[in-house]
Image: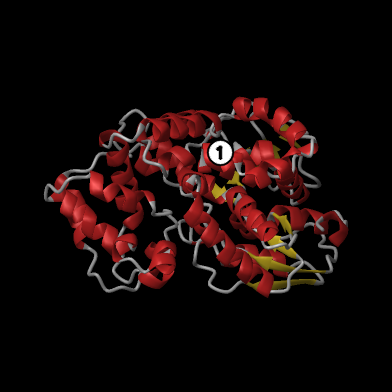
Amino acid sequence: MDAETPRDRQNLLGDCVHCGFCLPTCPTYVLWGEEMDSPRGRIHLMAQREEGAPLAPMVQHFDQCLGCMACVTACPSGVQYDRLIETTRAEVEDEHPRPLRERVLREAVFRLFPYRRRLRAVRGPLRLYQRSGLPALVRRSGVLERISPTLAAMERLAPPLGPAPRLPERVAARGGRRATVGMLTGCVQGEFFPGVNAATARVLALEGCDVVIPRDQGCCGALSLHSGRAEEAAAFARATIETFESVDVVVVNAAGCGSSMKEYADVLAGDPAWARRAAAVAAKTRDFAEFVDELGPRAERHPVPATVAYHDACHLSHAQRIRSQPRRLLAGIPELTVREIADPDVCCGSAGTYNLFQPEAAAQLGDRKAGTVRATGAELLVAANPGCSLQIATALRRQGTDIAVAHTAQVLDASLRGLGRAALL
């Protein structure tokens, strides 16, 4: 993240007029009604910090923020809360001494999830564990909860794992080529949801794109950036820029990753050797739905007779302001009925690593979101972020409901290939 002077920060803090428009959209304020767990309350704490107040008593309130950016969308004054919370979290990471147990757990998470090879190494044992019948016994015993709520959350959230096919480095366009695009496969998306990446590549190819899928690509830096690990995020950003700067467009199918890549210009603004390159890659990054909607339909849409509920991932709807595009893509599929979820602006509780480090609050938000999904009566939930899919599916199971979950790309893939609803349910 680019360095800020105290004057810059004071100006950003001063933009907040404490009107309260953000309150009904803030997940933690909705849960607890506590002023210090609202955006304007946290901004008040940041201002106190600027005046010399100690950091330690404030950390809990900053940690409990999901970083969902719903307040940014709701704010009539244009307060850049996204920038404020990211720089504040970087300050917390640099200056606040967390307890040893918490430091170990946090470091374990950040040493695992952004690294595809490490995720792949645990994938096989995790799959065996899921097929062994042990998960039900472990959850009934509560042993993981006693060891660590974070470990228990990781175990609950893990999706059912099947074979993980690997994509080729290039998928050729069907028919005349309309574009050549690079595709980010992601960390969690690539290892836990390989079917989403396969569907993304097929849809792009069927719509006339040559799809370049670099084999050596790594993490985009999203988890690190949103958790205040600024130098780590910058290192991931540089590597991703090198991987994709030779393509014309970078297509991303995970909302959090796309949001972070579009921030690269800010992440590396203070680095003269990388600032221009970062801005160039940020400018050509597109969310999957955004790009396919811009491209326009060419392949024939076949009927998918199903009722779906569409979930707005926070880093798609708030951070990237992408709402209408996925709905237009779904509306273009014959016989597909799309139902809206109540309170769409309130986060599901996933928020990157939030459901690992704040599992109790995340579970409350997950249950709230699952209830609104169930109320639609839909047979399929469509979401555009792997964290959201894991979070809501887990909450639905907790409520005794097993609604199928799919990505927008998978629904389009089923339509373009004429597979119908059977491929999704």
Give the quarter of the figure containing the N terminus. Answer: top left
- Image side of residue 220 versus residue 330, left or right: left
Give the quarter of the figure containing the C terminus. Answer: bottom right
In the depicted structure, whether residue 319 falls above or below residue 339: above
How are the colours assigned in the image? secondary structure
Residue at 36% of width from left, 54% of height from top?
A: 82
In the depicted structure, whether residue 372 falls above or below residue 384: below
In the depicted structure, whether residue 295 falls above or below residue 87: below
Judge by depth and name the residue closer to the eye, 380 or 289: 380
In the depicted structure, whether residue 386 falls above or below residue 68: above
Give the percent coordinates (x, y) of residue 311: 61, 63
Residue at 33% of width from left, 44% of height from top?
A: 89
Give the percent coordinates (x, y) of residue 292: 65, 55
Rate crowding at label 1 as few (under 14), some (14 to 19) or many (20 or more) other CA atoms within 10 Å.
some
Give the percent coordinates (x, y) of residue 388: 59, 54
Residue type for callout 1: Leu
- Image side of residue 73 versus residue 374, left or right: left
Residue at 32% of width from left, 72% of height from top?
A: 76
Q: Is residue 420 visible?
A: no
Judge by depth and name the residue closer to the eye, 269 or 43: 43
- Image side of residue 351 versus residue 399, left or right: left
Q: Is residue 99 visible?
A: yes
Give the percent coordinates (x, y) of residue 157: 63, 46
Judge by depth and name the residue closer to the eye, 299 or 162: 162
Element assignment for label 1: helix
Mark 1, residue position: 151
Residue 295's image quarter? bottom right
Residue at 48% of width from left, 41% of height from top?
A: 222
Residue 185's image quarter? top right
